[in-house]
C-alpha cells in the first residue's frame, strides 16, 4: 500500500482506470484519500465513464416520475439507494406548478420533461434536467416556419378525456452527441416527432447550436398509410446511437441514426416469421461489446404456454440476420411474462406480472423485474413495485454518486 500511495496522480489514474467496473472503482476509491482524490476528479471520471457502461440502477415509471431502486442482493442495490436519497426525482426545482410537468425520457443522467401550452397538445414547453445536481435548461420553442409543417398530428400519449394536460400529439426524447473524452460535458440532442395524416414530421434541437433543425423522414409506402401512422412512437428501442420503432401492420422498423440524424426503413421479417407480435416490448435491442446489435424476440403466444426468446445479430442494417440462440424461459413465467423493459450489456430486464393465484390478495399484487443473463441463463431479482396499475416502466442506468458529474 505504501508503494501505491507514493505514486503520482497521473500514474495512479492509469491504474484506477483499469478497474473492471464502476462498482469496483467505488470500492477502490474508498480505500484511502489519494485514491478518492484521483477517482473523484472530473477529468478522471469522464475518462473512466468513456470506457465503461453505466450500471442498471432501477426502474423508472414516467407516470408520477417514480424511481424504484434496484434491490439487494443485486450488486447495484447500494448505489441505487444512494441515488434515490440524493436526487430529486420529484423535479421540484422546475418552474411551478411542478405537477404540470410530464416526464418523457432519460439518458446519460439527463431527464426530459415537458408541460402543455394553453390549447395545444402538440407544442409544449420542454426542459432538460439533472435531478442529482438540480439543474435545468428550458429549450426555446420550435420556430414558426417548422411548426407550420405539422398538420393534424395523431395523439401519441394520453388522450383519455379527463387528463387533457397529460395528452401529447408529439413524441420527444433525448439522444447523446459527442464523446465523454476531454474537459467539457458532451452535447446532447432532443428529437421531436409527430405522426400526421400521411407523413412523419421530425425536428431536432442541438445543445451546441442552440437551435431547432428539420429532419427528413424516409419516403416509404408504409409511412404514407393513415392507419399505419397511428403508431405510438414512444414504444422504441435503442442501441449504438440508433432508435427503432415497429411500423404497425408491417414487419419493418423505422430507424433513426442519431449520430448522423438520418432515417431509414429496415426489413425485420426474417426474425418475426411465424411469430405473433402483439406488443412492442416483445422485441428489444441489446448492445454487444464488439459494436454489433443483438435483437431479442420474445415468442409468447405459443400453444405450449411457454415463453421463448430468440436472439439474432446484425450490423449496419444488414439484410443478413445471424441466428445466435434460442432460450426457453421458466415454465411458470409463461402466463406472467409482460415483456422486456430494457437491456444492459449481456443482461435483459424482464417484467413479470403477479402470480394468478394471488389475484384476490391486494398485498401480493406486485410487479417484479428480473435480470436474465443471456449467456449463463442465470436469473436474479432486480426490483419490485407494489402496484398493479403500472403501465409504463423503463430500465434506468447510471453511475454511482462518486462518478456522477453535472449533465446540464
Image (spheres, rainbow, N blue to C red):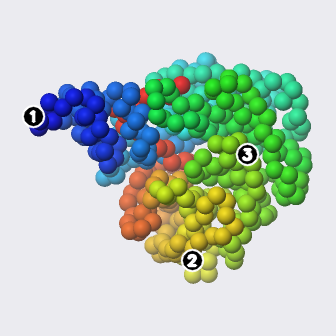
Note whether 370 is above or below 68 in the view shown: below
SS at badge 1? helix
On residue 2, the disc is: 1
Q: Is residue 104 visible?
A: no
Q: Which residue is mark 2?
A: 305
Mark pair 3, 2: CA separation: 40 Å
Mark 3 or 2: in front is: 3
Q: Of the two numbered discs 3 and 2 on the same chain, state the one appearing first in sequence.
A: 3
Q: What is the crowding at mark 1: few (fewer than 14 residues within 10 Å), some, or many (at least 20)? A: few
Mark pair 2, 1: CA separation: 61 Å
Relative side of 90 to 22, left or right: right
Query: Decide: marks 1, 3 in contact (CB < 8 A)?
Result: no
Query: What residue appears at the point 44 percent right and 62 percent down from the top-left corner?
Result: 372
Query: What residue appears at the point 67 percent right and 47 percent down from the top-left corner?
Result: 257
Residue 403: give x, y in percent of width and height.
37, 34
Q: Of the two numbered discs 2 and 1 on the same chain, state the one appearing first in sequence.
A: 1
On residue 262, the disc is: 3
Residue 272: give x, y in percent of width and height.
68, 71
Amino acid at each position: 500500500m505504501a508503494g501505491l500511495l507514493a505514486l503520482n496522480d497521473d500514474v495512479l489514474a492509469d491504474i484506477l482506470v483499469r478497474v473492471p467496473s464502476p462498482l469496483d472503482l467505488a470500492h477502490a476509491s474508498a480505500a484511502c484519500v489519494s485514491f478518492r482524490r484521483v477517482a473523484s476528479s472530473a477529468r478522471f471520471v469522464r475518462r473512466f465513464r468513456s470506457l465503461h457502461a453505466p450500471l442498471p440502477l432501477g426502474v423508472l415509471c414516467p407516470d408520477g416520475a417514480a424511481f424504484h431502486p434496484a434491490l439487494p442482493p443485486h450488486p447495484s442495490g447500494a448505489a441505487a439507494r444512494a441515488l434515490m436519497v440524493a436526487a430529486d426525482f420529484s423535479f421540484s426545482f422546475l418552474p411551478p406548478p411542478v405537477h404540470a410537468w410530464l416526464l418523457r425520457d432519460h439518458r446519460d443522467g439527463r431527464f426530459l420533461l415537458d408541460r402543455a401550452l394553453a390549447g395545444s397538445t402538440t407544442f409544449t414547453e420542454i426542459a432538460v434536467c439533472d435531478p442529482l445536481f438540480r439543474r435545468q435548461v428550458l429549450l426555446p420553442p420550435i420556430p414558426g416556419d417548422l411548426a407550420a409543417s405539422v398538420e393534424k398530428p395523431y395523439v401519441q400519449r394520453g388522450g383519455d378525456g379527463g387528463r387533457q394536460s397529460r395528452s401529447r400529439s408529439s413524441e420527444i426524447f433525448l439522444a447523446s452527441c459527442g464523446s465523454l473524452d476531454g474537459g467539457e460535458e458532451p452535447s446532447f440532442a432532443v428529437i421531436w416527432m409527430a405522426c400526421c395524416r400521411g407523413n412523419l414530421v421530425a425536428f431536432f434541437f442541438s445543445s451546441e447550436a442552440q437551435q431547432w433543425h428539420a429532419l427528413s423522414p424516409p419516403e416509404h409506402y408504409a409511412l404514407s398509410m393513415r392507419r399505419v401512422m397511428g403508431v405510438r412512437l414512444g414504444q422504441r428501442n435503442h442501441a449504438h446511437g440508433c432508435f427503432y420503432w415497429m411500423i404497425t401492420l408491417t414487419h419493418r422498423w423505422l430507424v433513426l441514426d442519431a449520430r448522423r440524424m438520418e432515417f431509414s426503413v429496415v426489413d425485420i421479417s426474417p426474425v418475426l416469421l411465424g411469430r405473433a407480435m402483439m406488443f412492442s416490448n416483445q422485441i428489444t435491442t441489446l448492445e454487444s461489446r464488439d459494436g454489433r446489435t443483438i435483437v431479442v424476440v420474445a415468442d409468447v403466444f405459443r400453444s405450449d404456454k411457454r415463453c421463448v426468446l430468440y436472439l439474432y445479430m446484425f450490423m449496419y442494417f444488414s439484410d443478413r440476420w445471424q441466428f445466435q440462440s434460442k432460450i426457453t424461459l421458466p415454465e411458470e413465467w409463461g402466463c406472467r411474462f409482460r415483456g422486456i423493459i430494457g437491456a444492459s450489456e449481456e443482461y435483459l430486464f424482464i417484467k413479470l406480472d403477479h402470480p394468478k393465484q394471488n389475484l384476490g390478495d391486494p398485498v401480493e399484487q406486485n410487479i417484479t423485474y428480473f435480470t436474465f443473463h443471456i449467456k449463463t441463463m442465470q436469473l436474479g431479482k432486480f426490483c419490485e413495485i407494489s402496484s398493479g396499475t403500472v403501465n409504463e416502466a423503463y430500465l434506468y442506468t447510471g453511475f454511482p454518486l462518486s462518478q456522477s458529474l453535472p449533465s446540464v
